[in-house]
């Protein structure tokens, strides 16, 4: 049974989970609870009402009502996963997009989804089969007045084409830039230390070209690997923490910079703080530092150092090991100098 990031799982207990990984342990699919039945819920589907839950609410709900969806990971952390016998349906973004394109009705939000698909087909030459729509639209639990569009592009190279295309046509087409007011709110939500000032944060976010506005509705261009890009098996890699490190380096390959996690292949690494080991990549588990740097750019990064053991041994720097990412960052070396 296959599932990848951006899929949703509908369970026999009338719960909706969002898949969080490409690789899964035996007998279950790693995913995170998103919607629960609630007679007073703000979302509805087939006369049933649901509520969206945050992380704290999700863990509390499962702990008290459905502990069978929780299990201990090899890092002694509680994780969520849907057992195979609890799966009623796997909801796939590519199938949902086709369904919408075949019958958008008069729903304005869904018509905007179709418009996005047409734009990326016409301007970026990405086939419809390599697109999808996730988020609240996937299970049909969206609010037409306030819901955003989580637009999925399959294949990392296709995703880069979509972002490059948006960068070229934004504000010259129906696709628009995001207002400064939005970036200010996002800064307050994400940044909890002095790693990035507001001007730096806004500069990075604007140049990523992974988020914009179509006819007044916010959309994200989300990367998901094609099936042939998914390698390995769950649990093959083992991780050993080696403390904190700070490095200077050059980005050799940023194709996976918007993946989950974001991955930057690096070279010419100079270790400023921490153990002296041959670091070959940086992984980011926070949206703030996804797409932060591009091929050939020189960066400064700080995070947790890990030894990764598989068939071979490698070392990576991990950014975003906590929700707040305090004193963990990826920044261009040039902007680091200018902001002193």
Image (cartoon, grey):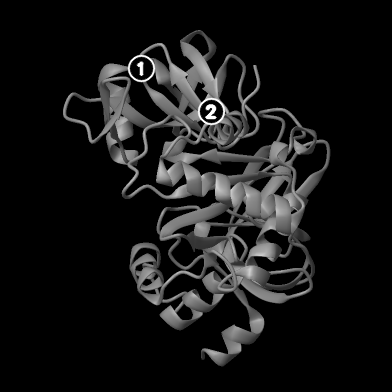
Which is nearer the eye, 286 or 19?
Answer: 19
Residue indicated by mark 2: 30
**Left or right, residue 288 beside residue 46:** right
Which residue is located at x 77 percent, y 52 percent?
Answer: 125
Which residue reaches farthest front?
Answer: 106
Q: Quadrant of residue 67?
A: top left
Image quadrant containing the N terminus: top right
Which is nearer the eye, 333 or 207?
Answer: 207
Vertical relation: 208 (above or below) 305: below
Vertical relation: 208 (above or below) 87: below
Which is nearer the eye, 303 or 113?
Answer: 113
User: Residue 251: x percent and y percent?
Assistant: 75, 68
User: Residue 126: x percent and y percent?
Assistant: 74, 48
Residue 129 in view of the camera: yes
User: Residue 202: x percent and y percent?
Assistant: 48, 76
Whether residues under marks 2 and 1 lie with C-beta atoms below 8 angstroms apart, the answer is no
User: Residue 169: x percent and y percent?
Assistant: 64, 69
Q: The residue tagged with tag 2: helix, strand or loop?
A: strand
**Left or right, residue 41 beside residue 165:** left
Residue 260 in view of the camera: no
Query: Residue 81 — which label?
Result: none
Which residue is located at x 41 percent, y 40 percent?
Answer: 107
Which residue is located at x 35 percent, y 44 percent?
Answer: 144
Residue neighbourhood size for the residue with mark 1, other residues' Cα within 10 Å, grouped as few (<14), some (14–19), many (≥20): some
Residue indicated by mark 1: 14
**Left or right, residue 200 beside residue 169:** left
Q: The residue tagged with tag 1: helix, strand or loop?
A: loop
Mark 2 / mark 1, whichever is N-terminal? 1
Q: CA distance from mark 2 to mark 1?
A: 17 Å
């Amino acid at each position: 049974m296959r599932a990848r990031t951006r899929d949703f799982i509908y369970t026999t207990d009338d719960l909706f989970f969002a898949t969080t990984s490409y690789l899964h342990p035996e007998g279950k699919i790693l995913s995170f609870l998103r919607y629960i039945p609630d007679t007073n819920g703000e979302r509805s589907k087939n006369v049933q009402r649901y509520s969206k839950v945050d992380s704290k609410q999700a863990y509390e709900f499962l702990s008290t009502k459905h502990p069978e969806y929780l299990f201990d990971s090899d890092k002694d952390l509680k994780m969520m996963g849907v057992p195979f016998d609890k799966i009623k349906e796997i909801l796939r973004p590519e199938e949902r997009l086709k369904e919408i394109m075949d019958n958008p009705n008069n729903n304005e939000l869904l018509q905007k989804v179709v418009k996005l698909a047409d734009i990326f087909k016409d301007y970026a030459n990405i086939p419809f089969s390599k697109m999808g729509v996730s988020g609240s639209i996937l299970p049909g639990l969206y609010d037409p007045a306030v819901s955003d569009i989580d637009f999925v592009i399959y294949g990392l190279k296709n995703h880069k084409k979509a972002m490059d295309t948006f960068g070229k046509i934004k504000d010259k087409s129906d696709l628009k830039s995001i207002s400064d007011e939005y970036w200010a709110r996002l800064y307050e939500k994400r940044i909890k230390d002095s790693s990035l000032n507001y001007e730096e944060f806004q500069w990075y976010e604007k140049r990523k070209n992974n988020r914009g506005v179509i006819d007044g509705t916010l959309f994200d261009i989300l990367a998901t690997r094609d099936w042939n890009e998914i390698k390995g098996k769950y649990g093959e890699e083992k991780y050993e923490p080696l403390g904190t490190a700070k490095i200077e380096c050059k980005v050799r390959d940023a194709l996976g910079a918007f993946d989950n996690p974001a991955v930057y292949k690096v070279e010419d690494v100079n270790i400023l703080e921490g153990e002296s080991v041959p670091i070959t990549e940086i992984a980011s588990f926070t949206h703030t530092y996804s797409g932060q740097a591009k091929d050939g750019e020189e960066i400064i990064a700080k995070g947790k150092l890990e030894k990764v053991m598989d068939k071979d041994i490698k070392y990576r720097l991990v950014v975003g090991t906590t929700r707040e990412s305090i004193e963990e960052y990826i920044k261009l070396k040039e902007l680091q100098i200018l902001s002193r």
